[in-house]
């Protein structure tokens, strides 16, 4: 029997990442979907992949979850080589697709027990795990009702619960809140955060909602034209885009005029008695502005920091506003 091929770990060094990829490529005919992307996702984190229609987000999930073979590149998932140990990858992951994969003719409990059977769990363990998941996702009262009677939010919760039956260490969530109302979406956010905080699960998230990535992700990557065009925390990505500024409000015209003489690049709003000073949103920049005001003995009434949001980032990096409907592969 061949020993499992895993990513080596040198004694005394950090554990390998939950997901790593180098030079992943995929084409469909002449259409290049992925053009050599690299990923490094730490354990116990939430990683969000953003991109416009056709960017290749779903293809990336399909490749990393062993559903589609790449044309080139390498990847390791939970320490398992994607090409040589796909069974090890499948045993470590769970996948929740864009559409709830639940059986409408079965009850919530029956759906979970079916998944337990597919995972080859002993009958008693399957029932125990199903009951625990029903309670965790607040579906106990609806456990024996047919899924056809469920709301969209309930179906999404059940779908994620079914993914957790196999106790995966890495979960791929491909647009998990599409079609949900704002309250149901925020409930899903709470569940996703708890999976990471309480269980140490790693989440690979694709989403059509930029606010969702901003709220959830430790790191965000933007995919466009088959390439990763940017990666970082939400704040790091926002600082890439011009337009950030510090708005300083003054109580009188004399204080505004005095301050304006010390900030040549600032836009002065006489009616609002305010200055708009270009800023990258960093602490050193804010401290420098405060030092200048203090040295000039200018009294500011209020100060607010404004940074571009992810919509601005998305537009600047991809050349288009983000789509509210993603049909990408």
Image: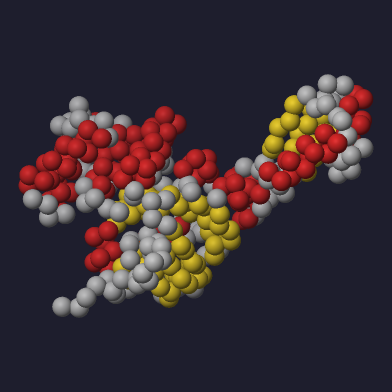
Q: Quadrant of residue 29?
A: bottom left
Q: How is the image coloured?
A: secondary structure
Residue 54 visible from this viewpoint: yes
- Vertical placement of residue 268 versus 195, above or below: above
Identify which residue is drawn at 26% across, 61% down: 90
| Figure quadrant of the N terminus | bottom left
- Image quadrant containing the C terminus: bottom left
Residue 112 figure quarter = top left
Between 151 and 217, the residue placed more toward the observer is 217
Q: Residue at x 58, y 58 (%)?
A: 230
In this rendering, is residue 51 above or below 8? above
Question: Can you give x and y, in whole percent of width and height, for residue 299 in the image?
Answer: 83, 26
How many numbered marks are there?
0
Q: Residue at x 26, y 39 (%)?
A: 158
Residue farthest top in this picture = 251
Is residue 321 visible to us here?
A: no
| In the image, farthest residue toward the left | 123
296 above or below 171? above
Q: Nearer the viewer, residue 22 or 6?
A: 6
Outermost residue, front side: 12
Between residues 263 and 50, which one lies in front from this camera angle? Answer: 263
Residue 97, given in percent of the width and then of the height, sits at 34, 50
Quarter-of-image position of residue 15: bottom left
Asked if residue 277 lies left or right of residue 193, the reply is right
**At 89% from the left edge and 26% from the top edge, which residue is drawn?**
255
63 vs 137, left or right, is: right
User: How far across and how far down the image is residue 154, in percent?
Assistant: 30, 34
Q: Is residue 199 left or right of residue 124?
A: right
Q: Position of residue 57 (x, y in %)?
A: 45, 57
């Amino acid at each position: 029997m061949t020993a499992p091929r895993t990513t080596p770990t040198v004694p005394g060094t950090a554990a390998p990442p939950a997901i790593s990829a180098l030079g992943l490529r995929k084409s469909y005919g002449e259409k290049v979907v992925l053009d050599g992307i690299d990923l490094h996702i730490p354990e116990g984190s939430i990683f969000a992949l953003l991109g416009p229609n056709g960017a290749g987000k779903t293809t990336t999930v399909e490749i990393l979850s062993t559903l589609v073979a790449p044309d080139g590149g390498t990847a390791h998932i939970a320490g398992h080589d994607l090409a040589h140990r796909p069974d090890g990858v499948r045993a470590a992951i769970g996948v929740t697709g864009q559409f709830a994969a639940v059986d409408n003719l079965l009850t919530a409990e029956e759906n979970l027990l079916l998944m337990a059977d597919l995972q080859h769990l002993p009958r008693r363990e399957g029932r125990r795990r199903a009951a625990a998941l029903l309670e965790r996702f607040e579906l106990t009262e609806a456990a024996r009702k047919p899924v056809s009677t469920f709301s969209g939010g309930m179906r999404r919760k059940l779908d994620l619960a079914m993914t957790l039956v196999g106790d995966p260490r890495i979960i791929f969530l491909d647009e998990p809140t599409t079609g949900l109302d704002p309250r149901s979406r925020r409930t899903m956010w709470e569940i996703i955060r708890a999976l990471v905080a309480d269980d140490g699960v790693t989440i690979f998230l694709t989403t059509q909602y930029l606010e969702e990535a901003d709220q959830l992700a430790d790191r965000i990557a933007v995919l466009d034209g088959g390439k990763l065009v940017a990666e970082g925390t939400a704040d790091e990505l926002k600082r890439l885009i011009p337009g950030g500024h510090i708005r300083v409000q003054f109580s009188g015209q004399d204080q505004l005029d005095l301050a304006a003489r010390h900030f040549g690049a600032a836009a002065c709003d006489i009616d609002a008695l305010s200055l708009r000073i270009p800023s990258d949103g960093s602490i050193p920049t804010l401290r420098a502005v405060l030092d200048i005001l203090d040295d000039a003995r200018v009294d500011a009434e209020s100060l607010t920091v404004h940074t571009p949001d992810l919509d601005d980032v998305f537009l600047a990096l991809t050349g288009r506003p983000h789509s509210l409907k993603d049909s990408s592969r």
